[in-house]
Image (spheres, rainbow, N blue to C red):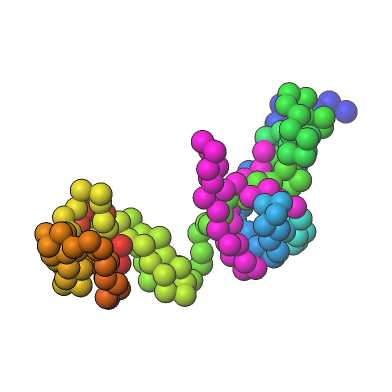
């Protein structure tokens, strides 16, 4: 049976759509379990597949490596918990050999854009109503749901100390210094160092106008 141009184009389109159906690029997911020692998570994807009017759930993905910021010998990590959002990206080539043994070059598999090659980036878009109280339009903020807050910006409340900031010494320290000076001036045979009464030896009188914690 001869195939005309239109039929040929339709067949090609069906083949392409079938291949793209299995191709994964980026999907939101939620943490099911976190292995802090291995820096991996088990995740559930928040959306499944849909084809020809039929929806299907995708499986929970185990042992997905977490992409915390790590470079220059340092790292910034977070205590991931069940229910936390992550964004999954799917490698364009298999990463098993590299992720497990550090083997570079040969991916040792023909797959690409596959569920098995997911990488989890902590954070992601949450549904409306679960996004907190909003972001600051003026400051950089690091927040914690239990109430912790670090704010960097002019509208923060507590100035951060700098090594060049002036300090006003406390009355307790002034008394202590005065006692030592008096004994030295009197040229006494044995100088008795008095205890420093009080827990504060001074107060920073001014701090950074830009870096503040509040």
Q: Which region is colored magenta?
A: 63-91
What residue is shown at x 27% (from left), y 66% (from top)? 193
Side of 120 where 74 appears, left or right: left
Tell me residue 168's x, y (percent): 15, 63
Residue pushed farthest right? 1
The quarter of the displayed image where residue 207 is located = bottom left
Tell me residue 106's x, y (percent): 78, 25
Side of 148 where 111 appears, left or right: right
Residue 83 sits inside the magenta stretch: yes
The quadrant of the image that shows the C terminus is bottom left
Residue pushed farthest front? 189
Tell me residue 157's x, y (percent): 24, 67
What residue is shown at x 63% (from left), y 59% (from top)? 29
Residue 210 sits inside the magenta stretch: no
The quadrant of the image that shows the N terminus is top right
Residue pushed farthest top? 105
The quarter of the displayed image where residue 10 is located = top right
Count of numbered circles in the view: 0
Which residue is more in the foreground, 54 or 85?
A: 85
Tell me residue 200's x, y (percent): 26, 70
Does residue 200 sit above or below 123 in this rendering?
below
What residue is shown at x 42% (from left), y 74% (from top)? 147
Visible in this render: residue 162? yes
Which residue is more in the foreground, 86 or 172?
A: 172
Which residue is more in the foreground, 102 or 117?
A: 102
Visible in this render: residue 52? no
């Amino acid at each position: 049976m001869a195939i005309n141009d239109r039929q040929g184009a339709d067949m090609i389109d069906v083949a392409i759509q079938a291949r793209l159906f299995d191709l994964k690029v980026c999907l939101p997911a939620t943490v099911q379990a976190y292995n802090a020692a291995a820096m991996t998570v088990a995740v559930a994807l928040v959306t499944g597949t849909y084809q020809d009017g039929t929806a299907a759930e995708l499986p929970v993905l185990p042992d997905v490596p977490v992409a915390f910021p790590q470079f220059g010998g340092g790292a910034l990590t977070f205590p991931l918990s069940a229910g936390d959002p992550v964004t999954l990206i799917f490698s364009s080539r298999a990463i098993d050999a590299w992720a497990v043994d550090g083997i570079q070059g040969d991916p040792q598999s023909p797959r690409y854009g596959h569920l098995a090659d997911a990488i989890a980036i902590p954070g992601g878009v949450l549904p409306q109503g679960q996004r907190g109280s909003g972001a600051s339009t003026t400051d950089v903020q690091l927040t914690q749901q239990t109430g912790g807050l670090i704010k960097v910006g002019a509208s923060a409340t507590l100035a951060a100390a700098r090594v060049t900031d002036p300090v006003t010494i406390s009355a307790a320290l002034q008394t202590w210094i005065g006692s030592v000076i008096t004994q030295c001036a009197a040229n006494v045979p044995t100088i008795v160092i008095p205890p420093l009464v009080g827990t504060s030896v001074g107060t920073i009188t001014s701090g950074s106008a830009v870096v503040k914690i509040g």
